[in-house]
Image (cartoon, helix red, strand yellow):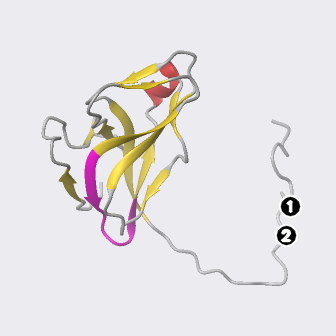
Amino acid sequence: MKTVKVKIKKKEGTDDLPLPQYMSDAASGMDLYAAVENDVILKHNEIKLVPTGLYIEIPFGYEAQVRPRSGLALKHGLTLLNTPGTIDSDYRGEVGIILCNFGKEQFIVKRGLRIAQMVIQPVVRAELVVVNQLEESCRGEGGFGHTGH
């Protein structure tokens, strides 16, 4: 498995929180922890930005993708908006997680709760080429639901 070095800085006052970590040998995402000062209540359909207390320096040519945790989604209806969220290699601000509660009950975000996953990915940039016509395909212009499902 390929590795890449990512520099990380913890916000003052977050020494009690673990660094992001892979929870199994085959995990592609590192769990991120809530660095809230006090419990944060997320009501049904409410959206809040939850801090992680982390600043990262991703090498040029890579990005971090922030994704929901499947257990929180299934059990509580908790997800991330704009998922996957992208953290570009030139961003140096605190990593924040945009949580949304689609569950029926309010959800309490406690300090140290694993709230999201972060995946480091290589970036491929597109070179756009303007043409007068595109090659035909068997799908053609068939869009959403074109297969009947």
Label count reads: 2
Residue 69 falls left or right of residue 39: right
- Label 2: which residue? 136
Q: Residues within 10 Å of mark 2 (few under 14, many from 20)?
A: few
Residue 134 location in percent, x, y?
Answer: 81, 75
Residue farthest toward the left in the current orientation of the protein: 15
In terms of secondary structure, where does tag 1 sit?
loop
**Residue 25 is inside the magenta segment:** no
User: Who's the residue at 59% across and 80% down the image?
Assistant: 127
Q: How far is disc 2 from disc 1 in space, using C-alphas?
A: 6 Å
In terms of secondary structure, where does tag 2 sit?
loop
**Residue 59 is inside the magenta segment:** yes
Q: Amino acid at mark 2?
A: Glu
Residue 146 location in percent, x, y?
Answer: 85, 46
Main SS category, magenta section: strand
Q: Residues within 10 Å of mark 1 (few under 14, many from 20)?
A: few
Check the image and report above or below for 6 versus 124: above
Q: Which residues are magenta?
A: 53-63
Give the position of the N terminus as an image quadrant.
bottom left
**Mark 2 in CB contact with mark 1 (< 8 angstroms):** yes
Residue 40 location in percent, x, y?
Answer: 37, 27
Check the image and report above or below for 73 versus 14: above
User: Who's the residue at 39% across and 21% down the image?
Assistant: 108
- Label 1: which residue? 140
Check the image and report above or below for 8 versus 112: below
Give the camera-side residue of 90 and 135: 90
Give the position of the C terminus as an image quadrant.
top right
Residue 38 falls left or right of residue 12: right
User: Who's the residue at 57% across and 75% down the image?
Assistant: 126
Q: Amino acid at mark 1?
A: Gly
Give the camera-side residue of 37 and 61: 37
